[in-house]
Image (spheres, rainbow, N blue to C red):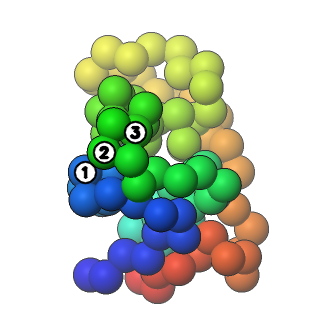
Amino acid sequence: MTTTFIMPTSPETRELLDSIADEMVTEIGIPYAEAVARINAHWHRQDLSDEDCIVLHEDERFWSFVMYYGRNVPDWRPGADRSGWVPTEPPAAGTKFWTVRD
């Protein structure tokens, strides 16, 4: 599947962004198109083309939870009960962030 991110990326950050999208699909259970839209919305004003980009200092699980649940993730442990957690709203349909169709 071809993923279109709207911000500049290096090969390293591109790999991380792909991993974040995959993590949101497998761990959280959202559609791939929504995962990419959330990534695009989160970093649309950033230049991620530097090989030493700060976003590379966290892993895909961290970023996927931040992008889905917001900055105040209640419990980072694997297997945590997320049934009561409230996700943030995805980007509005039809905006520039939605670059992939499921």
Q: Quadrant of the N terminus?
A: bottom left
Identify the secondary structure beneath mark 2: loop
Q: Are marks 3 and 2 in contact (CB under 8 Å)?
A: yes
Q: Which residue is mark 3?
A: 53
Q: Which residue is mark 2?
A: 51
Residue 24 point in image, percent of width and height: 38, 50
For marks 2 and 1, give the CA distance.
6 Å
Q: Are marks 1 and 3 in contact (CB under 8 Å)?
A: yes
What amino acid is labelled 1 in the image? Glu
Q: Is residue 16 visible?
A: no
What amino acid is labelled 2 in the image? Glu
Residue 23 point in image, percent of width and height: 30, 48
Residue 60 point in image, percent of width and height: 32, 39
Looking at the picture, does residue 77 appear above or below residue 8? above
Identify the secondary structure beneath mark 1: helix
Looking at the picture, does residue 61 appear above or below residue 37? above
Residue at image location 53% in from the left, 53% down from the top: 47
Residue at image location 61% in from the left, 26% down from the top: 71
For marks 1 and 3, give the CA distance.
9 Å
Residue at image location 34% in from the left, 27% down from the top: 57
Identify the secondary structure beneath mark 3: loop
Q: 2 or 89, which lies in front?
A: 2
The quadrant in which residue 29 appears is: bottom left
User: Which of disc 1 and disc 2 is earlier in sequence?
Assistant: 1
CA neighbours of label 1 inside 10 A, class few (<14), some (14 to 19), many (20+)? some
Give the side of residue 71 with respect to residue 89, left or right: left
Give the side of residue 5 with respect to residue 17, left or right: right
Q: Are marks 2 and 1 in contact (CB under 8 Å)?
A: yes
Q: Which residue is mark 1?
A: 12
Q: How many marks?
A: 3
Residue 83 point in image, percent of width and height: 50, 31
Residue at image location 40% in from the left, 39% down from the top: 53
